Amino acid sequence: MNPQTGAPENVQLTPADIISLMGDFYLTVDDLAHAPAGELRSILDVMQRERAGTISDANQQYEQITGGRYLTLAQRTLQCWTLPWLH
């Protein structure tokens, strides 16, 4: 929300942004569609710095930005992709 007008803020996402955000940061498309603009911008900023190699604690920052959701979703994703016979 824009603090001055109260209107929702939109963040323009590229297809690559959506792919990067889904699963690791948002469980459903609805979660992504309703994510706070500031959170999206912060995550995308950390992603950009991570790709540029200018950040050393990206996972900690993602965890802080998402209020603990990042590592929870990462664990869930790992369980989905782990082959059952390897348990």
Image (cartoon, helix red, strand yellow):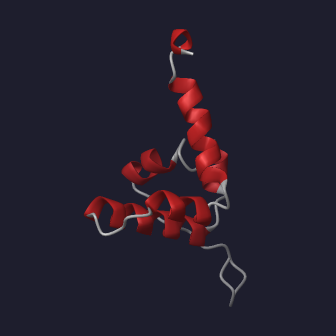
Identity of the residue drawn at 39% across and 55% down: 14
Residue at the limit of the structure toward the top, as seen here: 85
Residue 28 shows in the view: no
State which quarter of the image contains the C terminus. Answer: top right
Indicate the position of residue 19 as horizontal and vertical percent values.
44, 45
Side (left or right) of 82 relative to 34: left
In terms of depth relative to the viewer, which is nearer, 1 or 87?
87
Where is 50 relative to 75, above or below?
below
Q: Is residue 62 left or right of residue 8?
A: left
Q: Residue at x 68, y 90 (%)?
A: 4
Please state which of residues 65 and 2 is positioned toward the viewer in this rendering: 65
- From this view, report whether residue 35 is shown above or below residue 6: above
Specify the farthest residue to the front. 87
**Residue at 58% in and 67% down:** 39
Residue ID at (30%, 59%): 51
How many labels were placed on the picture? 0
Indicate left or right for 4 with 23 as reference.
right
In the figure, is residue 15 to the left or right of 85? Answer: left
Compare residues 41 and 79 and report the one nearer the observer. 79
Where residue 8 sits: x, y (%)? 66, 73
Picture quarter containing residue 55?
Answer: bottom left
Q: Give the position of the N terminus as an image quadrant.
A: bottom right
Return the residue found at the far right.
6
Residue 79 image point, x, y percent: 58, 27
Res. 74 in view: yes
- Residue 42 location (% of width, % of height): 51, 69
Q: Residue furthest bottom?
A: 4
